Image: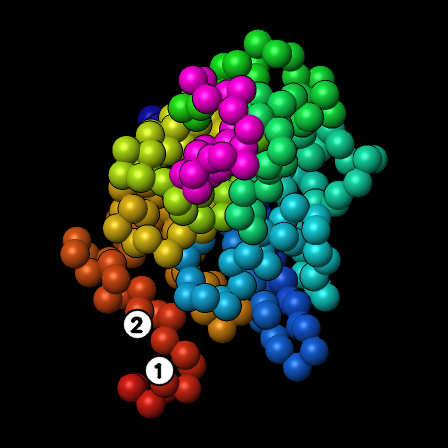
């Protein structure tokens, strides 16, 4: 009797974008973007300045709407507003730099968000410890360094223990020790069955952080898959630059 092999289950997708298009005036921002982010993975969105990374994040959070195409986050279209509070609580985000109240302490910044989501004070204390602000939690954020503000922004993002984290350049402002701690935190977060999507221009850090990457250029995804399959060791930057070369220049080079 022949035993049929058990089929490998398809990866579960936390985020899926299909043929997403967006134009602003004469500028084509996204030109048929396809993006697939697996559950339980750290996925990095890479691209040169103006490639559409921040725009993609805003679309995923429902802060913008595409001209066409479909977007699903945790199985449903993203949308902001009070009616979608339950869905939004499953997504933690930090985009466009640390969005914090500088006249409040780190604790009170988290307390503002906690009151909106029903999170208790014990969780606030735990988050302050996780992001390395336990000893400065009562200090006003206006006195924080850029690195401390980045830590607080991360604390806001993880406060509700969301299923998906969307972080735009989360390592900005962090010192080397902070970057190491962030890397471990995000990898542990994904290992617990959650999903992390980050953008970054620090390719050396992405090598140590990400499981998968998507490379954006000219409004489309030019590569999507495992980091290990993207380039040979030591050639990540070379391959990234080749893929993200402007279309006209790439055609001339060919």
Residue 149 visible in rendering: yes
The residue that mark 2 highlights is 242
Frontmost residue, 176 versus 11? 176
Q: Which residue lies furthest to the right in this view?
A: 83
User: Above or below — where is 51 with respect to 169?
Assistant: below
Location of residue 159 in the rendering, given as x and y in whole percent from the top left corner: 57, 24
Q: Residue furthest bottom?
A: 252
Q: State the residue at coordinates (57%, 9%).
A: 122
User: Above or below — where is 26 with respect to 71?
Assistant: below
Left or right for 86, reference 32: right
The residue that mark 1 highlights is 250
Frontmost residue, 126 versus 241? 126
Q: State the residue at coordinates (63%, 49%).
A: 60
Q: Does the magenta stretch include residue 153?
A: yes
Location of the N terminus (image quadrant): top left
Location of residue 19 in the rendering, given as x and y in whole percent from the top left corner: 61, 63
């Amino acid at each position: 009797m022949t035993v049929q092999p058990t089929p490998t289950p398809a990866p579960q997708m936390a985020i899926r974008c299909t043929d997403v298009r967006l134009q602003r005036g004469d500028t084509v921002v996204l030109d048929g973007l396809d993006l697939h982010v697996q559950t339980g993975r750290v996925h990095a969105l890479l691209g040169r300045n103006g490639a559409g990374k921040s725009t993609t994040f805003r679309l995923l959070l429902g802060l913008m709407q595409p001209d066409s195409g479909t977007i699903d986050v945790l199985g449903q279209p993203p949308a902001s507003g009070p009616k979608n509070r339950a869905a939004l609580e499953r997504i933690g985000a930090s985009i466009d730099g640390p969005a914090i109240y500088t006249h409040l302490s780190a604790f009170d910044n988290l307390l503002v968000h906690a009151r909106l989501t029903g999170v208790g004070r014990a969780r606030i204390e735990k988050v302050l410890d996780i992001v390395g602000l336990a000893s400065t939690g009562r200090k006003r954020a206006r006195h924080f360094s850029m690195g401390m503000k980045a830590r607080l922004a991360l604390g806001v993002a993880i406060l509700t223990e969301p299923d998906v984290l969307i972080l735009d350049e989360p390592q900005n402002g962090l010192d080397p020790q902070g970057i190491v701690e962030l890397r471990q935190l995000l990898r542990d977060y994904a290992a617990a069955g959650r999903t992390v999507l980050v953008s970054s221009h620090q390719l050396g850090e992405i090598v140590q952080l990400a499981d998968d990457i998507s490379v954006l250029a000219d409004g489309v995804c030019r590569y999507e898959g495992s980091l290990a399959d993207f380039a040979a060791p030591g050639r990540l930057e070379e391959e990234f630059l080749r893929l993200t070369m402007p279309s006209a220049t790439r055609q001339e080079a060919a």
